[in-house]
Image (spheres, rainbow, N blue to C red):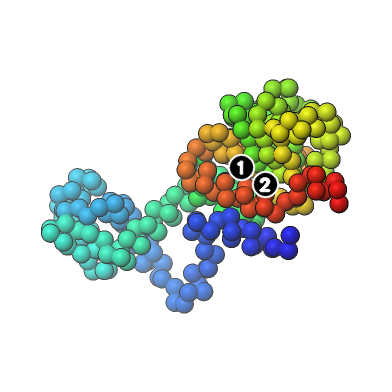
């Protein structure tokens, strides 16, 4: 396992826009007023990202007057962001890039706001990579009134799934809190990656259960020395969990059924699985 954490991050997010180059490293920065001008016209750019529109379509789509639509289209042409083709305004390559950028900006800012509890609970190096996949995810947080809400959400999804894969720094379902039907490796096909000490704890507290599931082919356990957060892949949804460093309790659980989130989760799990040890090999070493 001679690969660095950064290598793993880059590999697991290779199909996402994960550049970490800061704007000031690219040369002369855009003026603040210029950036604000682009943001102020974001609805105009977003309207044209999908398809070219004529002036009447723009006015109807944006709910603006004729005079405003003239001002908008003049701004587009003056900045080289659109050209007129067959009386319709089509974004140039530069305009398309601007449109895509403002869509991502608003999406990421909204997602960061919604995912704030999760981003506070996971390693700093991994924070930016969970924003895009879970931009529209369901966020469940622990509160003084309901400290086990994230755990309850996880158990709900587990009960609805015939398969379960994931990794975690602690028990996915705390043994002390779990009902028999809530244990991840009971009644379903399961593949889990845990820290070595967590596997040792499982083998000490539930030896017969674990060995029976492994021998029946329903459970595959692997270990790894470090893991960034909790990852859960169910039949229909995928989720990420953040934990309290002191108590080990789940502080937040974010889940999604989007194709982007599932693709991301599958790649992340495969990467960590490839760099983990089956418990059989570890026990023999």
Residue at the location (69% across, 63% down)?
Answer: 4
Viewer-nearest residue: 16 or 106:
16
For marks 2 and 1, give the CA distance. 7 Å
Confirm or deny contact between disc 2 and disc 1 (CB under 8 A).
yes
Residue drawn 73% across the image and 22% down it: 180
Q: Residue 274 at what x, y percent from top left?
A: 67, 52
Residue at image position (74%, 41%) is: 221
Residue 76 occupies quadrant: bottom left
Residue 240, numbered label: 1
Does residue 283 sit above or below 22 in this rendering?
above
Q: Mark 2 points at which residue?
A: 229
Please state if 260 lies on the left or on the right of 233 as rendered.
left
Q: Residue furthest bottom?
A: 27
Characterize the local packing of mark 1: few (<14), some (14-19) or many (20 or more) Cα atoms within 10 angstroms.
many
75 or 19, nearer to the observer: 19
Residue at the left extreme of this rendering: 86
Q: Where is residue 195 in the image (x, y as percent from the top left)?
A: 77, 46
Name the image quarter holding the N terminus.
bottom right
């Amino acid at each position: 396992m001679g690969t660095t954490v950064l290598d793993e991050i880059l590999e697991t997010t290779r199909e996402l826009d994960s550049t970490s180059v800061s704007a000031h490293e690219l040369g002369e920065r855009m003026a603040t007023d210029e950036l604000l001008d682009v943001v102020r016209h974001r609805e105009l750019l977003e309207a044209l990202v999908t398809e070219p529109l004529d002036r009447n379509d723009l006015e109807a789509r944006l709910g603006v007057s004729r005079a405003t639509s003239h001002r908008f289209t003049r701004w587009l042409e003056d900045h080289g962001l659109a050209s007129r083709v067959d009386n319709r305004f089509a974004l140039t390559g530069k305009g398309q890039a601007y449109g895509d950028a403002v869509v991502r900006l608003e999406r990421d800012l909204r997602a960061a706001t919604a995912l704030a509890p999760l981003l506070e609970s996971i390693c700093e190096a991994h924070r930016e990579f969970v924003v895009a996949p879970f931009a529209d995810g369901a966020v469940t947080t622990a509160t003084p009134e309901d400290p086990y809400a994230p755990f309850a959400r996880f158990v709900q999804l587990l009960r609805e799934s015939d398969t379960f894969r994931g990794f975690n720094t602690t028990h996915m379902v705390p043994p002390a809190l779990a009902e028999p039907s809530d244990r991840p490796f009971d009644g379903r096909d399961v593949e889990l990656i845990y820290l070595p000490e967590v596997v040792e704890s499982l083998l000490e507290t539930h030896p017969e259960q674990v060995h029976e599931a492994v021998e029946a082919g329903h459970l595959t356990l692997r270990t790894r020395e470090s893991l960034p957060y909790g990852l859960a892949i169910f039949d229909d949804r995928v989720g990420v969990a953040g934990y309290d460093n002191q108590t080990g309790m789940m502080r937040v659980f974010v889940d999604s059924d989007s194709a982007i989130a599932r693709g991301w989760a599958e790649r992340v799990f495969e990467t960590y699985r490839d760099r983990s040890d089956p418990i059989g090999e570890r026990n023999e070493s």
